[in-house]
């Protein structure tokens, strides 16, 4: 029988999924970008923890990483050309905006921290707080690698998706600068799995041991199999 806590957790999870889908629609994203980076990030996260509660937090943080862009004006968010300095200043407020949204969802404290720090860089050159190294939330350090992987291997208005090997080379070259070397090592260790997931638009090769709260995300991509 479902407890009140279970019901609340399911309601919060459904709300988080809806927020992510709303942002993807607003940004004209295709292929469930937010869910894709969330389940890819889990592949790396399971090399660092087996705690299902911690994995849920990392999943929700990755899923909702850009939710703060809901508070960015369409003229900036959807602009086709290069942003000017004032526009960039506004765009750079989205981690704090996202943090304020996610921090209000009960039980998503760690996820909110990931949202706040997902634009930080391992060498301290990121934003909004110029955090460095392990000052950055683990989930955000893992997400950073996956976000680059997804960005490079997905179609964009100005180019077609690049090969996995191009993304791999970029990620390896930025180890210690943009990316945590430990996260890069985890990426290389999980390369075979991630290659398959990229090729099949997120579906994990073996999802039998993924925590219950995100099984439906993986299964929802079964229809995308070739």
Image (tube, rainbow, N blue to C red):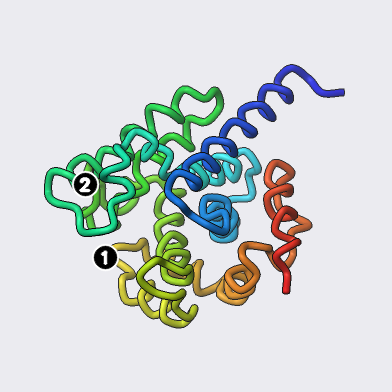
Q: Earlier in the sequence, mark 1 or mark 2?
A: 2
Indicate the position of residue 50 as horizontal and vertical percent values: 64, 50
Image quarter where the C terminus lies is bottom right
Q: Residue furthest right?
A: 1
**Viewer-side residue, 181 vs 187:** 187
Query: Camera-side residue: 170 or 82?
Result: 82
Residue 113 visible in image = yes
Residue 165 rendering spot, x and y as whole percentages: 46, 82
Q: Position of residue 182 (x, y in %)?
A: 42, 64
Determine the residue positioned at 74% across, 59% down.
207
Question: Residue 23's mark?
Answer: none
Is residue 90 found left or right of 70 in the rendered image?
left
* Quadrant in the picture for the N terminus: top right
Q: Which residue is mark 1?
A: 177
- Could you tell whether 105 is left or right of 74 in the image? right
Say if residue 45 shows up in the picture. no
In space, the residues marked 1 and 2 are separated at their CA atoms by 13 Å
Q: Is residue 136 above or below residue 207?
A: above
Question: What residue is disc 2 on?
Answer: 130
- Which residue is at a point 72% across and 53% down the rendered structure image? 220
Residue 173 place in picture, x, y as percent: 32, 76
| Disc 1 element | loop
């Amino acid at each position: 029988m479902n407890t009140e806590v279970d019901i609340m957790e399911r309601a919060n999870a459904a709300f988080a999924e809806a927020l992510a889908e709303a942002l993807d629609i607003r940004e004209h994203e295709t292929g469930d970008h937010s869910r894709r980076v969330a389940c890819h990030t889990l592949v790396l996260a399971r090399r660092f923890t087996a705690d299902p509660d911690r994995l849920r937090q990392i999943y929700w943080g990755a899923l909702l990483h850009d939710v703060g862009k809901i508070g960015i004006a369409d003229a900036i968010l959807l602009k086709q050309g290069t942003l000017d300095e004032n526009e960039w200043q506004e765009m750079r407020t989205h981690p704090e905006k996202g943090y304020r949204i996610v921090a209000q969802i009960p039980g998503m404290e760690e996820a909110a921290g990931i949202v706040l720090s997902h634009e930080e860089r391992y060498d301290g050159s990121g934003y909004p707080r110029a955090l460095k190294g392990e000052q950055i939330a683990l989930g955000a350090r893992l997400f950073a690698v996956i976000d680059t992987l997804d960005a490079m291997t997905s179609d964009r208005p100005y180019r077609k998706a690049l090969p996995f090997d191009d993304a791999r080379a970029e990620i390896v070259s930025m180890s210690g600068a943009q990316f945590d070397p430990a996260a890069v090592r985890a990426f290389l260790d999980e390369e075979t799995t991630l290659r398959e997931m990229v090729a099949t638009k997120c579906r994990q090769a073996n999802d039998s041991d993924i925590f219950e709260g995100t099984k439906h995300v993986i299964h929802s991509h079964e229809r995308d199999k070739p």
